Amino acid sequence: MRPAWKSPHGRPLPAIGNGLLVMGILNLTPDSFSDGGKFVDTNAALAHARHLLANGADVLDLGAESTRPGHAAIDAETELGRLLPVLKAVRAEFPEAPISVDTFKAEVAARALEAGADILNDIHGGRHRMASGRSPMCEIAARAGAPLILMHNRATPAPDPVFWDEFLGGLRQSVQLALTAGIPASQLWLDPGFGFGKTPAQNLECVRGLDRVKTLGFPVLLATSRKSTLGLVLSGAPVDARLEADKAVSAWGAALGADMLRVHDPAALRPVLDTINAIKSGLLWQKPPFPPPVPSGQPK
């Protein structure tokens, strides 16, 4: 049995393998592709954190720098200025909620962990500012004892004939960076990087063959929510009209071994997620309790 992943702060993290987990997205940016600008105010961000947790998010993922195509890069201090007030407010109100921070900068990761974050979610798979084969992000995670999600990413798409070799090879290289830095294998997750350094067809291919990612031996986060490839599949559907595609990808990904979905709106996906987890339970499934019927003539 795989050892449980652990927060550096000792708080429990959701069990892996007992059902599909949900990571709720909390963007603190003015320019994210989906909900940029909605939660830049700390009170608005805190209210959305409440909404995500109330609607089934197992983990909150706080991100303070947009990584959409054409995004404007920001420095670490700007990112921390957006991130830390919300992180501290969420941690104060929800002392036991698992919090992930979506950053590729080691200095941001270190400050976030000090402020109470539990998990690091790195879109560059530990490769940002590498020097002499050493990963600053992996070293920060190793020193703190924090779980690290390693995403596949590359500057330009690989040619289709070598896609799978490059794709799986890139994930293996990120894993090796993390293990060399001293992170236990039980603290590592993989993310296929849907929408990052891939053609639309390659994005779909990495979901189609997600079971091949699972063969690497690590839990998998699937982060496809509302992304542009799904809009293309739906004949150019805008961001707010991609829910049906999100549902389809959730079901497909779960069937091929995804362990957690990163989503914008857990409430909208709740019927799909409940059904997926019921199917995963199989013979162990039990009917949830329903509220008692309201007597005739009484207000509902």
Image (spheres, rainbow, N blue to C red):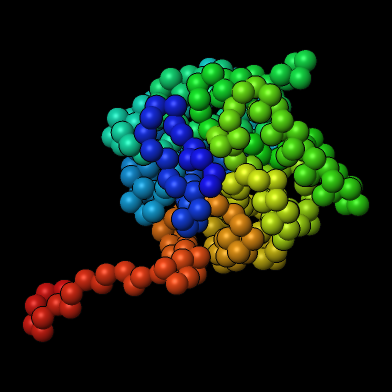
Q: Residue at x 50, y 21 (%)?
A: 144
| Residue 102 spot, x, y in % from top left | 55, 34
| Residue 85 spot, x, y in % from top left | 39, 25
* In the foreground, 79 or 139: 139
- Report the side of 61 relative to 67 (left or right): left
* In the foreground, 5 or 99: 5
Residue 159: tell me if it is visible. yes
The outermost residue toward the bottom is 296
In the figure, residue 299 lies in which quadrant?
Answer: bottom left
| Residue 213 spot, x, y in % from top left | 70, 50
In the figure, residue 104 lies in which quadrant?
Answer: top right
- Report the side of 262 relative to 256 (left or right): left
In the figure, residue 105 lies in which quadrant?
Answer: top right
Q: Residue at x 60, y 35 (%)?
A: 185
Q: Is residue 30 above or below residue 14?
A: above
Q: Residue at x 36, y 70 (%)?
A: 286
Residue 82: tell me if it is visible. no
Quadrant position of the C terminus in the picture: bottom left
The outermost residue toward the front is 1
- Report the side of 297 relative to 250 (left or right): left
| Residue 223 spot, x, y in % from top left | 60, 49
